[in-house]
Image (cartoon, rainbow, N blue to C red):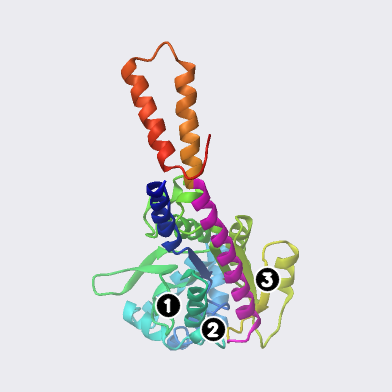
C-alpha cells in the first residue's frame, strides 16, 4: 500500500508541476497602434499623402480582383522604384521604431505576464497581423512576442524587397490560431493540417485570447470564441467609434469590447485579468481530474483483464493464466484503497 501511495504521490507531483499555457493573439494596426503602421514614416518617406497611397492601392486591388494586402505591398515596391528609394529590410525595421502605440501598450505585456505567473499560468504573446512583419520587428514591443505572424517580402541577396512572400488577411489569419494551439509554429509546417486530440494540444483553444478591431479579425475572433476561447474587440479611445464592436458583440463574434487603452486600470486590463482568473480555475480543475484519472484507469485496466480471463476460461494455457494473474496482482498493488 505504501508503494502505491508513493507512486501516485510522485505522479501527482509531476502533474501539478506542469504549468498550463495560455496565449494572447493580437492584430496590430488599430489594435495596438492607432493607425496603419505604414502611415507613420514609411509612406511619408516617399513624399506622398497617405490617403493618396491607400486610394491608389485600393483601386489597384479592385481593378484587378486583387487581395488588398498584395495591392499595397505591390504599390510600395512601385513607389520605391519610381522614387529610386530601395526598400531594404533594415529600413522597414527602422521605421518600426517610429510606430505609435496606444496608451499602456509598452507596459501591458510585463504586467499581464506577472499577473498570469501569480495565477500559475505561463502566458505567451503572438501577433497575427495584415501589416508588415519587418516594421513590427522594429517596434519597441517586438521583444515580447513569441512569434510575429504578418505580411512579409521576399528579399534579394542585398536585402531589397522584391516580391510579397506572405500576405496575411481575413480567413488565412486563422491558420496561425491552429499553429499556436498545435505547436507547429513555422509557416511552412504542413502538420498544422493534421488532426490532433485536445489533450495533445500545446495550448488548448479555450486558453487562447484574440484581440482585434476590424473585419479582417472576424474569422479569428469567431474561431477562437467558437472553440471556447475569448475574443475582444477594441476601438480608438479618442474617436470613440463603437459601431463595429457593438455589431461584433451583437453577432456573437466577441466576448468583450473595450477602448484600446492598455494602462493598468483600464477596462481591457480588467477583462484580461478576469479571463486569466477563469483559465487558472479551469486548469486547476483539469489538474485534479487528471490526478483522479490515474488510479481509475488502472482499475479499469484490471477489470478488463479479469473480463478477458473469464471470457476464455478453457482456451487459456497455464502460462497465459499466470501472466494474467500477475498483471492483475500488479495492478491491484498500485491501486489505492479497497477495490473488492
Q: Nearer the viewer, residue 51 or 300?
A: 300
Q: Relative to 271, is 20 on the left or the right?
A: left
**Observer-nearest residue: 226 or 48?**
226
Q: Is residue 135 visible in this depiction of the protein?
A: no
- Sequence-wise, which precedes: disc 1 or disc 2? 2
Disc 1 or 3, which lies upstream in sequence? Answer: 1
* Residue 103 sits in quarter: bottom right
Task: Point out the stretch of residues depicted in magenta.
Answer: 264-293
Residue, disc 1: 144
Give the distance between the C-alpha atoms of the residues marked 1 and 2, in whole angstroms: 29 Å
Q: Residue at x 63, y 56 (%)?
A: 226
Q: CA distance from mark 3 to mark 2?
A: 32 Å
- Mark 1 is surrounded, within 10 Å at the Cα level, by few (under 14), some (14 to 19) or many (20 or more) other residues, namely some
Q: Residue furthest top?
A: 314
Compute the Cα span from label 1 to label 3: 23 Å
Residue 42 at x, y = what percent? 44, 84
Residue 312's x, y, as percent? 45, 15
Mark 1 or 2, closer to the camera? 1
Residue 59 drawn at (x, y percent): 57, 70
Badge 3: few (under 14), some or many (20 or more) residues near its Cα, within 10 Å? Answer: some
Residue hosting label 2: 50
Does residue 150 sit above or below 181 in this rendering? Answer: below
Q: Position of residue 87 (x, y in %)?
A: 35, 78
Find residue 278 and report its image quarter: bottom right
Q: Is residue 106 left or right of residue 234?
A: left
Residue highlighted by disc 3: 256
First along the sequence among labels 3 and 2: 2
Q: Residues within 10 Å of mark 2 (few under 14, many from 20)?
A: some
Q: Is residue 246 left or right of residue 15?
A: right
Q: Residue at x 41, y 37 (%)?
A: 331
Q: Circle 1 sits in a helix, a strand or a loop, which is it?
A: helix
Amino acid at each position: 500500500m505504501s508503494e502505491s501511495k508513493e507512486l501516485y504521490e510522485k505522479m501527482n507531483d509531476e502533474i501539478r508541476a506542469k504549468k498550463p499555457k495560455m496565449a494572447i493573439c493580437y492584430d496590430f494596426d488599430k489594435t495596438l497602434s492607432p493607425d496603419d503602421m505604414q502611415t507613420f514614416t514609411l509612406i511619408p518617406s516617399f513624399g506622398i499623402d497617405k490617403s493618396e497611397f491607400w486610394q491608389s492601392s485600393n483601386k489597384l486591388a479592385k481593378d484587378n480582383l486583387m487581395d488588398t494586402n498584395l495591392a499595397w505591398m505591390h504599390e510600395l515596391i512601385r513607389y520605391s522604384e519610381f522614387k529610386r528609394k530601395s526598400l531594404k529590410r533594415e529600413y522597414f525595421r527602422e521605421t518600426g521604431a517610429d510606430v505609435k502605440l496606444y496608451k499602456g501598450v509598452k507596459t501591458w505585456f510585463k504586467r499581464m505576464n506577472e499577473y498570469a505567473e501569480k495565477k500559475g499560468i505561463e502566458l505567451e504573446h503572438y501577433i497575427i497581423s495584415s501589416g508588415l512583419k519587418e516594421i513590427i520587428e522594429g517596434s519597441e514591443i517586438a521583444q515580447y512576442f513569441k512569434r510575429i505572424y504578418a505580411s512579409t517580402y521576399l528579399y534579394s541577396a542585398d536585402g531589397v524587397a522584391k516580391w510579397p512572400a506572405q500576405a496575411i488577411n481575413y480567413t488565412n489569419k486563422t491558420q496561425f490560431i491552429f499553429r499556436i494551439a498545435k505547436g507547429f509554429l513555422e509557416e511552412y509546417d504542413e502538420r498544422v493540417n493534421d488532426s490532433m486530440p485536445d489533450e495533445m494540444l500545446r495550448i488548448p483553444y479555450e486558453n487562447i485570447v484574440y484581440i482585434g478591431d476590424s473585419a479582417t479579425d472576424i474569422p479569428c475572433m469567431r474561431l477562437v470564441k467558437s472553440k471556447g476561447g475569448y475574443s475582444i474587440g477594441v476601438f480608438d479611445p479618442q474617436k470613440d467609434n463603437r459601431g463595429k464592436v457593438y455589431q461584433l458583440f451583437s453577432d456573437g463574434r466577441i466576448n468583450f469590447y473595450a477602448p484600446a487603452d492598455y494602462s493598468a486600470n483600464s477596462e481591457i486590463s480588467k477583462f484580461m485579468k478576469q479571463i486569466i482568473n477563469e483559465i487558472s480555475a479551469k486548469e486547476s480543475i483539469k489538474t485534479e481530474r487528471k490526478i483522479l484519472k490515474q488510479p481509475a484507469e488502472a482499475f479499469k485496466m484490471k477489470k478488463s483483464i479479469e473480463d478477458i480471463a473469464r471470457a476464455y476460461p478453457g482456451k487459456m494455457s497455464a502460462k497465459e493464466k499466470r501472466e494474467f494473474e500477475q498483471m492483475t496482482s500488479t495492478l491491484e498493488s498500485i491501486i489505492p484503497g479497497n477495490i473488492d
